Image: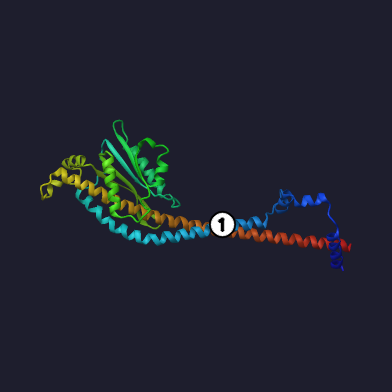
Amino acid sequence: MAMAALRREGRRVLLSTPSPAAAMAARSPAASHQEIAPLGARSISTQIVRTRMKSVRNIQKITKAMKMVAASKLRAVQIRTENSRGLWQPFTALLGDAPSVDVKKNVIVAITSDKGLCGGINSTSVKVSKALHKLTAGPEKENKYVILGEKGKVQLIRDSKNDIEMTISEIQKNPINYTQIAVLADDILKNVEYDALRVVFNKFQSVISFKPTMTTILSPEVMENQSESGKVGDLDSYEIEGGETKSEILQNLTEFQFSCVMYNAALENACSELGARMSAMDSSSRNAGDMLDRLTLTYNRTRQASITTELTEIISGASALEG
């Protein structure tokens, strides 16, 4: 009987004509906004939660796709990186490595990536480059930067704009090959005056780890002086065939050593970038999943509260009609 009275009351309300003021109030955006999310209310609109859930779900799809793309590229680059390590290691055995050599003109070659979303790999290279710049600075010394990668350029240009000698970007637009890197290395050697080239890059160790590394290439003049003093490899102990002089041989060795080191460093950094991007996108996907779970719980609670409120109003109305 109470439900029959409630239905009669509902028909009476529907048949009654609303006033113009009430109609305008019902059509006003403020009234609709208050209906969705009243000011000071503890609950939130289910429509807002659904929109947020949709955006988080789309972001999760993007991060998963980026992780899969990085994983598909990583294996091929990793094989080429491991093979490239055999190019520059004989130079270390022949000429040695002198990271602590004191020269007047230092050129720091910082290798970074062109794209972001790969963790702190670029920040690590920039920090090591800045620390090396500060360590080798002096009153009569000249330190310059050669930057490979857009991300390193953006970070170093803020406080070291006057020290940047050369910038190169988009070297990873196509798969890295030795011919491409040899042209870049020759361009650097022709346009930059140096006594020591210090190449800073991230050496790939595993998908979740990389190691900041520096390799030093000395100019032929400095190499000859260091060789005579016994600080680097002694070339006089080797038999030289042909009509070339020692200076010409050192010049050719320096150019070839720099191109091999640059080739390996570019591949090592690219491999580290893909591994870091895989880890970053995996973490982002898991965080998006956790956020989606929390939003789903909020949505279910809000919907349940709305249904409970409607049932309470119906029961209260029916009780009032019975009384």
Left or right: where 296 falls relative to 191: right
* Nearer-the-camera pick, 278 or 248: 248
Image location of residue 270, percent across then percent down:
36, 54
The quarter holding residue 155 reads: top left
The quarter holding residue 54 reads: bottom right
Residue farthest to the top, as pictured: 139
Query: Which amino acid is tagged 1?
Result: Val
Image location of residue 136, percent across then percent down:
31, 37
Image location of residue 251, percent across then percent down:
19, 44
* Image quadrant in which the C terminus is located: bottom right
The quarter holding residue 17 reads: bottom right
Image location of residue 150, percent across then percent down:
40, 46
* Image quadrant in which the N terminus is located: bottom right
Residue farthest to the bottom, as pictured: 1
Q: Residue at x 51, y 60 (%)?
A: 61
**Is the image coloured rainbow, by chain, by secondary structure, or in one colour?**
rainbow
Q: Secondary structure at mark 1?
A: helix
Name the residue beneath numbered marker 1: 56
Left or right: where 315 falls relative to 165: right
Whether residue 100 is visible: no
Q: Residue at x 31, y 33 (%)?
A: 138
Give the total of numbered labels: 1
Whether residue 173 is visible: yes
Pointer 1 local density, CA inside 10 Å: few below 14, some 14–19, many at least 20: some
Left or right: where 278 falls relative to 132: right
